[in-house]
Amino acid sequence: MADDKYKIQKIDDYRWRIPREGKMRVDGIVYADEQMLKEIQKDESLQQVINVAHLPGIVGYSLGMPDIHWGYGFPIGGVAAFDIDEGVVSPGGVGYDINCGVRLLRTDLYQRDITNKMESLVNTLFANIPSGVGSHRKDLKLSLQDEKNVLRNGARWAVSQGYGTKEDLEHIEEQGCISEADPELVSDRALERGRAQLGTLGSGNHFVEVGYIAEVYDEEIARILGLEKDGITIVVHTGSRGLGYQVCDDSIRVMINASRKYNIELPDRQLCCAPINSPEGREYLAAMACAANYAFANRQMITHWVRESFESALHIGPKESQISLIYDVCHNIAKFEEHIVEGEKKRLCVHRKGATRAFPPNHPHTPDAYKSVGQPVLIPGDMGRCSYVLVGTEKAYADTFGSTCHGAGRVMSRNQAVKVSKGRSIAQELKEKGILVRADSRATLDEEIPEAYKNVTEVVNIVEHAGISKKIAQLKPLCVIKG
Amino acid sequence: MPKYILIDHTADIGIDVFGASVQELFANAAFALFDIITDLSKVEGEIEYKISISGIDKEQLLVNWLHELLYLHDVKNLLFNDFCVVDITDNQLNAVVRGDVITEDKHVIKTEIKAVTYHCLSVIRDNDCWKARVIFDL
């Protein structure tokens, strides 16, 4: 396909190359089909793929996943890996919501077990899980010391306080704790913002969704993951709240100066960065790890309240509900990982901004329970359609630094979405489709209307056809709480 | 001339801000921030805060100014409706702002803004008018 603005070359039906030119250090590669590529070109996201390709020490390609859209600095749906010795780390390549991520829970319940109790269930979840601006659990008070323990230990801290079980930890990326975290590098402001917000969902596109398994594409793998048709599932999507935003903001200020200090030429100030091996780079990574751990703890605590909500709303015990964690993935993160580059094993710093790790079967970081099938990948859609469970593949490991898409990706700005939803009751429309929604703010629902997103099915089909993930099951929503 | 207009940005929200002077530009940018967050007609301005901010240039000064207000909003549960930029240079700003502590029954939160970004950031003088562009992360 010819294009005037960018010199895009077709690699195959699902991959497009933006050849290196000017000061780009590597090619850009975007995963999309022809139709989706046209959509992608409506905003500036391809320019952002090109901008990222300018950064020092970038290895292989600047990658765009099919849910790519215009972000700030890095595109959302972007993956970039950097050489440890020559490369940089960029807070903009992780984003403000550090370790924003998704976890999937399974249950022993079926749709028939909750059909008549849905109203009570959604209300209980909404009452128990703080959402929206300024809300928090009245029974949770953190001292500064507690908070620093959260930053050091992540989900492990939550489990040690009675939020969930040790088994949960095995089913979280990094076992719910990035070890390089140093709370002394987190500013007082970040700590202050984080203290009151632990165990809260936040607003925007964050949610807790109860759904059921509508389709199973691979029975054998689904069984190993613990998924069965009509089984009830829960998806939790949230991140590191104000603490993460503040860590990112603090770091960007440092990095703007660092970029000058190390003579790094930037096509966009938001791409500011520092060498991985510089004091600024190391300090960012240690503070980022704190925010990532906070997010792991946050999702772990919310999981505990999901379990409590099911038990109280359905009048059942934990033995009957059997709510267990399938997996928890980060989709805004930078990580040290080993990959094969030009036939050689190398340690790289992989930035995933709106992208999910998708490690193959038998990889040391794929949890033991899933060694034979690959790491579970969770792709939430919009509130009205569906979400997917996939697993990572060898091809993802070889071609995309073990990465895949993270969600549907917006096609409509929030402003447009609010205009489109004017005069409509989104909650009522969803109710007519059998989906109960509770939201702290009506504006959130309007901004998050299903039409504002790409169809997640199209996104997931591309990563499946391109071979960077394998589709296992489709989940459909029954009730959702949002901020 | 409007104080600001919203610009479409796929994932987030952006503003183009206008002012007859730099002081007015910075005050209008702050107004836009809280106009996006809340219904400002419900905010009375009962509390006064003095704010001093520095930055390496006008662009960073604008981000730091908005960020400071966002921080106070987040940590002290405040909504601001009145912004007086007392004096401003390329690197320094002193302002007096007024706002209320958020009361659940009185105030509404329309949108949570996570951060003020540096993406597409600009502050320019165009003849007699100052213009700025800022993208917020939602």
Image: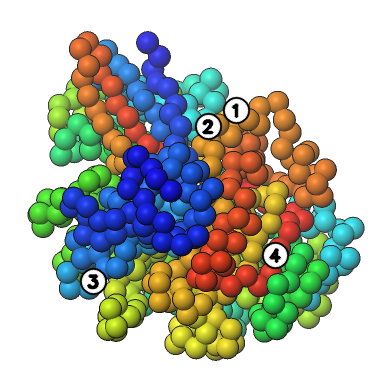
Name the amino acid, label 1: Lys
Cα distance between the residues tagged 1 and 3: 45 Å
SS class of the residue under badge 1?
helix
Amino acid type, callout 3: Asp
Residue A92 visible? The answer is no
Residue at x-position 70% and y-position 83%: A220
User: Which numbered circle lies on residue A377?
Assistant: none
Residues at marks 4 and 3 on the same chain = yes
Q: Are marks 1 and 3 on the same chain?
A: yes
Estimate how packed mark 1 is, as few (under 14), some (14 to 19) or many (20 or more) residues with alpha carbons within 10 Å.
Answer: few
Q: Which of the two discs, 3 and 2, labels the residue nearer the N terminus?
A: 3
**Residues at marks 1 and 2, CA–CA distance in whole angstroms:** 6 Å
> Nearer the observer, disc 1 or disc 3?
3
Dot 4 alpha-carbon crowd within 10 angstroms: few under 14, some 14 to 19, many 20 or more:
many
Separation (CA) of disc 4 from disc 2: 30 Å
Residue A166 lies, with reference to residue B89, above or below; the image says below
Q: Nearer the viewer, residue A274 or A395?
A: A395
Q: Residue at x 26, y 68 (%)?
A: A59
What label sits on residue A474 in the rendered view? 4
Q: Say which residue label 3 marks.
A: A83
| Mark 4 chain | A
Q: Earlier in the sequence, mark 4 or mark 2?
A: 2
